[in-house]
Amino acid sequence: MRILNFGSLNIDYVHRVDHIARPGETVAGLSLEVFAGGKGANQSVALARAGAQVSHAGKVGEDGRWLLEKLERAGVDVSLIEVDPDVKTGHAVIQVDDAGENAILLHGGANQKIDRKQIDRALRSLGEGDLLLIQHEINDGPYLIETAAKQGLPVCLNPAPMSSAVRDGPLDKVSLLIVNETEGEALCDETDPWEMLPRLVEMTGGEVIVTLGDQGAIYFSGEEAIHQPAIHADVVDTTAAGDTFIGYYLAGRASGEPVERCLKTATTAASMCVAKAGAMDSIPNNLEVSQHG
């Protein structure tokens, strides 16, 4: 199975702070580092490091060419990424505090300049048995889902960042929905994850995973529920933990592994990710994960 990830590519400006700024407050940064990021790019790298065959589609400006080189070195096919000289690459300003928690300000840039010609061209590259993965950091997500469904392609949606457009979109054409508790609540108005799961399955008709942070994750198919506990880690930076989980989970499913094993491996990889600083650079490879597990 080949996985096409049509997603964002960002330049991350990570500010280390002793606490995350509150409204109206000015906080002195303790350090600044620049990383490759974007939920889409992070998930593609996680897929590649987990051993999946992954192609990334998206758009950057001239200032983001180095992101393509970084993805390619990680094993991602970047032939479907376009460079637009008239726009700036998307970027994120990230505060990370002493507890490893983060707050993120996101500027879409080139990620919001995807046109339908690029979408159609990328989807035509997929064949039977392939899968489309998307997040919500690029524009025209509903068209992507609808077009993929018409081609008979399964779609995995990670609707982050959440907005009303996700709820109004074609969720009934999503084969696998992966959300955290906040996103799940926004979609179905339930706060209890166990009450959330059947509502989300009803909305999509597919499988659902709700990630629970330090409580692990729950998978629900409509018939079977599996809870995977979290694996303890000394938290440095949680920025790409969810992306790592998604990449490793999908890579496992693509290779035919059972759900329980995929959840365990994905949770292990995410626990290793949070123990390092940065987003993309903190994602472990499959050898490291297998040795850790």
Image: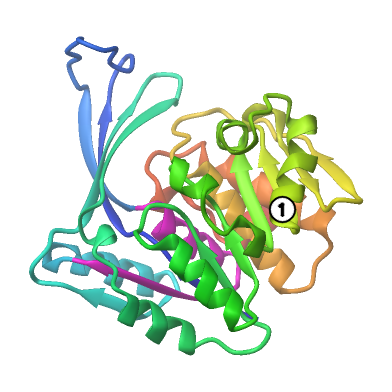
Q: Position of residue 20 (x, y in %)?
A: 32, 18
Neighbours of disc 1 within 10 Å: few (<14), some (14-19), many (20+): many
Q: Position of residue 227 (x, y in %)?
A: 82, 39
Q: Residue furthest right?
A: 223
Q: Is residue 39 magenta?
A: yes
Q: Quadrant of the N terminus?
A: bottom right
Left or right, residue 183 beside residue 94:
right
Q: Secondary structure at mark 1?
A: helix
Q: Residue furthest left?
A: 86
Magenta residues, start to end:
38-60
Image-quadrant location for residue 77: bottom left
Q: Position of residue 234 (x, y in %)?
A: 56, 28
Image-quadrant location for residue 111: bottom left
Q: Is residue 49 magenta?
A: yes
Identified at 68% across, 41% down, the residue is 210
Identified at 80% across, 42% down, the residue is 198
Above or below 183: residue 208: below
Q: Residue furthest front?
A: 168
Identified at 43% across, 43% down, the residue is 161
Identified at 76% across, 49% down, the residue is 202
The amino acid at mark 1 is Thr
Compare residues 242 and 200 and report the one nearer the observer: 200
Is residue 293 in view from this perspective? no
Compare residues 21 and 19 and report the one nearer the observer: 21
Above or below 208: residue 40: below
Above or below 36: residue 273: above
Visual colour scheme: rainbow
Left or right, residue 114 beside residue 154:
left
Q: Position of residue 197 (x, y in %)?
A: 76, 40
User: How many circles with numbers are drawn on the protein?
Assistant: 1
- Disc 1 designates what residue? 265
Is residue 27 in view from this perspective? yes
